[in-house]
Amino acid sequence: MIRLRRARPALPLLAAIVVLLPALPAAPLDAQEEGWEPVTWERLLEPRDGDWMSYRRTYDVKGYSPLDGIHRDNVADLRLVWAYSMRDNSRWVPGPVVANGLMYVSEGSGRVVALEVATGDVAWIHERTFPEDIQRSQAYPRHRGVALLEDVVYWGTADSHLVALDARTGEMRWERETGNFRTGQGHSHPPLVADGKIILGFTGGDRTARGNVSAYETETGELLWRVFTVPARGEPGSESWAQSALPPLGGATWHTISYDPELGLIYVGTGQPVPWASTLRGRGDALFTNSILALDIGTGEMRWHFQVIPEDNWDMDTPYESMLLDLVEDGETRRVLVHTNKTGWGVILDRVTGEFIRAFRTAYDNLISGWTDEGRPVFNPEQIPAPEDVDSGKVFEVCPHYHGARNMNSPSYSPVTGLYYVGINNSCMDVVFGYEEFAPGERYVGMRATPKRVPGLDYLGEFVAFDPSTGERAWTFRPEDDTAMTAAALATGGGVVFGGTANREFFALDAESGDLLWETRLNGDISGAPVTFEVEGRQYVAVGAGGRIAQTTSYSPLTGTNVPQGTGVIWVFALP
């Protein structure tokens, strides 16, 4: 069933006003000191209904809230409560977290901001001074969120440090160097805090960093274990890399990590190999890039791996989250993970063993024609470059574009409807392969790509509800202005699912039917992850907009969408 957007309901003038609040100097708040309720491990494990204290709220990264005060019958009455203008406006994908009435938002330019939810006032701002050559880090100037535990905010920085801040005052308690940002390494995503550990991945896969994921002790930041995602020469998996002058590089781990506390496993997605194209690095699967890794949270030991895209040539990296669900398969409940990515496909695996269960198509593609019983993609041979294609001018029309059928716009799952929601984009790219000189710390890709529309397809962005038990679409919502989907999805106990577009539209749909219930136009592309939470008995919905993210800048020219040059803004809504 496909639902087209109806005309936008009339909203009060207030809903279109950006409230710019002054940045106040950091200062402790007596009320917060006296009334602070620690963010305990137990509460992170089993959040209260009104909590949103980690990036996707729960360790299974469902992006779902059971709150139902805002529901399908009253969501049209949502009104702006306050907004705050941030400093970032490039690749800003905020995922706010909330505790004790404070909302914490991070910025790639080097700030963490704490805002009082009830008023929009600034509680404190912590600002970091970066080195002059911070541009060497691929994490600069982008950031997506922080993590909370007890009374501490944990922040991974672009200059490869783990920083612990007092959640009440913003004062720094300690910091630990985690890597070398001059190789491209850095942190742009929030850590996972679990089992007494802070687990943190790295960017750098578009440069020449060697991917890894590391665990640190929560009290001191002491390194507990580190696992590299590509092997050194002679290590298991290195035989899947060509015998070139370069060691295996890439496999960055820069997106959300999920966690199954009963199994004691974390699930980490890895990025593409370096260089991107096999025409420069040589043939071979290039393990453990473009893979899902199941790691023992206590030791970092790899229990299993599943490579989604072997022998990548097109930057179809798969570092995205693996959502953890329990589905009935052949009459029995099975612990699975659902992973969607750039390729226009999703895979469902047994999360205990890594066994491939099935794949399902999410968007248009001409790259993968099917999957083997073992879960290996069958590539279209016409899309695989040969050495003689380098610098030949030959153009490969590859679908989708490397900014993906989906990107960092995370999905959501509702246990009420049993549906998996995600915004996807249908696109292609014209690719040419060329020779490049290797330079440590610099981009090393071997290909150039130009985005284009899918030939013969009259729509680009879609917001889709999938039945994960079958992979079939339950319904599809397509905006009439054909614009790209940019926001993460948020499903709630009120029967509402939120999303957003490059054309500034923040919308709410009926989670069962896909009917449009409410929308409002904000300052820029809806670039962040919508969240909902409760403070002093009132339910709020918040989202970041104006981040000018990858899907916006690549796909907006294809749809005639104007992309504002302004700043990122945090918007907070509630019922009157």
Image: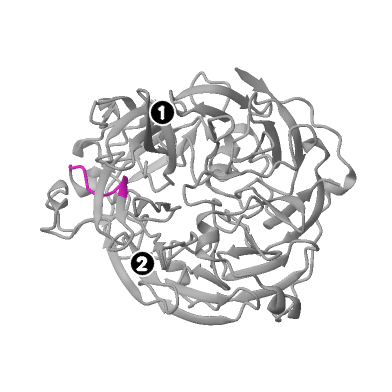
Task: Work out whether 435 lies above or below 159.
Answer: above
Depicted 282 relative to depicted 516: above or below: below
Span highlighted in magenta in the image: 283-293
**Kind of residue sitting beneath label 2:** Ala
| Quarter-of-image position of residue 106 | bottom right
Which image quarter: residue 201?
A: bottom left
| Membership of 410 in magenta stretch | no
Res 545 seen here: no
The answer to whether 329 appears left or right of 354 in the picture is right
Asked if residue 65 is positioned above or below residue 165 in the image, the reply reads above
Which residue corresponds to the image point at 74% horizontal and 32% vertical from the top-left? Answer: 72
Give the residue drawn at x 68%, y 32%. Answer: 509
**Which residue in the protein does label 2 denote?**
215
Secondary structure found at label 2: strand
Q: How many marks?
A: 2
Q: Earlier in the sequence, mark 1 or mark 2?
A: 2
Q: Nearer the viewer, residue 32 or 199?
A: 32
The residue indicated by pointer 1 is 328
Q: Residue at x 79, y 66 (%)?
A: 21
